[in-house]
Image (tube, rainbow, N blue to C red):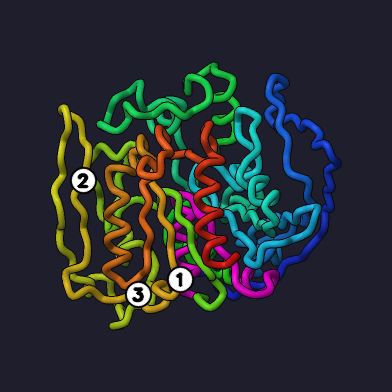
Amino acid sequence: MSFGIPFTFLLLYSFYAIAVSISPPVPVLPVSGNSQIQVTEARHTRKTYYLGGDYNQTASGTILQNQICVEQLTPAGGVTQPKPLVLLHGGNIAGDLWLNKPDGGRGWASFFLDRGYQVYVPDTWGMGRSGPAADRLRGGGSTVEGAERAFTAPELYNEYYQARFHTQWPGNGSLNDRTFDEFYSRFHPTSVGPEVEVIMRSALCDLLRTYISGQAIFVAYAIGSAYAIQASDACPELVAAHISLEGDQSPFQSYIRASEGIDDPIPYRPYGVSNIPLTFETPVTEPSRLRKATVGETTYTEGLLSNVSCVLQQNPANKLVNVAKVPMLFFVGEASVHALYDHCQVAFLRQAGVNVTFTKLADEGVRGNGHFAMLEKNSDQIALLVARWIEKRFG
């Protein structure tokens, strides 16, 4: 597959901005300038660098394109956990998703720093500090109304059955609520499509190979989980595990109103969980060679959509030989629209030979979460489930 850009990734440069907080942590005002919200972070040092990219000729001369930005966060007390974490964000919001919560609470980066993990936070190409992507690769991003409906206040819109269980967003989840405004101020268009996936696959393997000694663990959210799968396929020897928090939608298809999931899906991800080729046991040169079947039923509860059928491989399924080398933990929230269809991605991966532990948060006593669970009131409970799963295997 060719995209007209040479994907030979070069190391651009590295510069170090060392930021050491003191004890007790000092309140830091968010970038938006909302002076009513203060946040604190775990004590750490920070290195910021760019990697990947390729040089291209333009009418004006030679330029570097397609590099991504990565923050490396190191606990002030030193690293005590054997496997570093790479935190991959989803759409709409860049890597600062993990740093602090819009209500001023500490994010997952601080949670894991306090437990002794080395933490890496990339920005997806075309988002945050990873440079602008071409307009053809950008989704439109979410409107205020879309963010309320899909993320912060689905219970007010009642567009799918599980939405009524949403209780964990801090604040009322609506425009002019200070937490919502801080949350929405971080939004920008999302880079999507095969070209983005190729760039992220190469950049993530470059990160693991160049900067990390030994294997790392992906902790990936939404579309970030697709990049984790693709990197696991390309460099499985460098990936110890993949924790997916509501991974990127349903196999072979996508909902236009993606996060609401209430319209008819369109064909997407022709390789099941990827728009770019993956390594199957029987090589797949054309995605049409993957034989598909619809499994399960689309159901309604009290007149509202509560479950969707899945498009999977026909049995016997072709195996994902490299992705299957990486164990996965897959979470879904009780009130998220992903509760309608995340079982489909899990079923596809299991068919393909991947060892997936599928955890419904409500079954663990963690109730009321929407799609941005890592920003909600009980986010530390979810992070603790992640930490316990990791430390049971690698601690």
Mark 1 vs mark 2, foreground winner is 1
Q: Residues within 10 Å of mark 1 (few under 14, many from 20)?
A: many
Q: Residue at x 59, y 35 (%)?
A: 186
Amino acid residing under circle 2: Val
Magenta-drawn stretch contains 228:
yes
| Most common SS among magenta residues | helix
- The residue wearing badge 1 is 326
Give the structural element (helix, strand or loop) at label 3.
loop
- Classify residue 344 by image quadrant: bottom left
Magenta-drawn stretch contains 114:
no
User: Which comes before the other along the chain, label 2 or label 3?
Assistant: 2
Where is the N terminus found, in terms of image quarters?
Answer: bottom left
Where is the C terminus found, in terms of image quarters?
Answer: bottom right
Q: Residue at x 21, y 54 (%)?
A: 310
> Where does the image place residue 358, in percent across and percent down from the top left?
36, 55
- The residue wearing badge 2 is 308
How many angstroms separate mark 1 from mark 2 (CA)? 27 Å
Look at the image and tell me whether residue 135 can be seen. Answer: no
- The residue wearing badge 3 is 320
Q: Which residues are magenta?
A: 206-234
Q: Residue at x 18, y 65 (%)?
A: 292
Q: Nearer the viewer, residue 271 or 309?
A: 309
> Where does the image place residue 54, in percent across and percent down from the top left?
63, 69
Q: Nearer the viewer, residue 386 or 129?
A: 386
Q: Are marks 2 and 3 in contact (CB under 8 Å)?
A: no
How many angstroms separate mark 3 from mark 1 (CA)? 11 Å
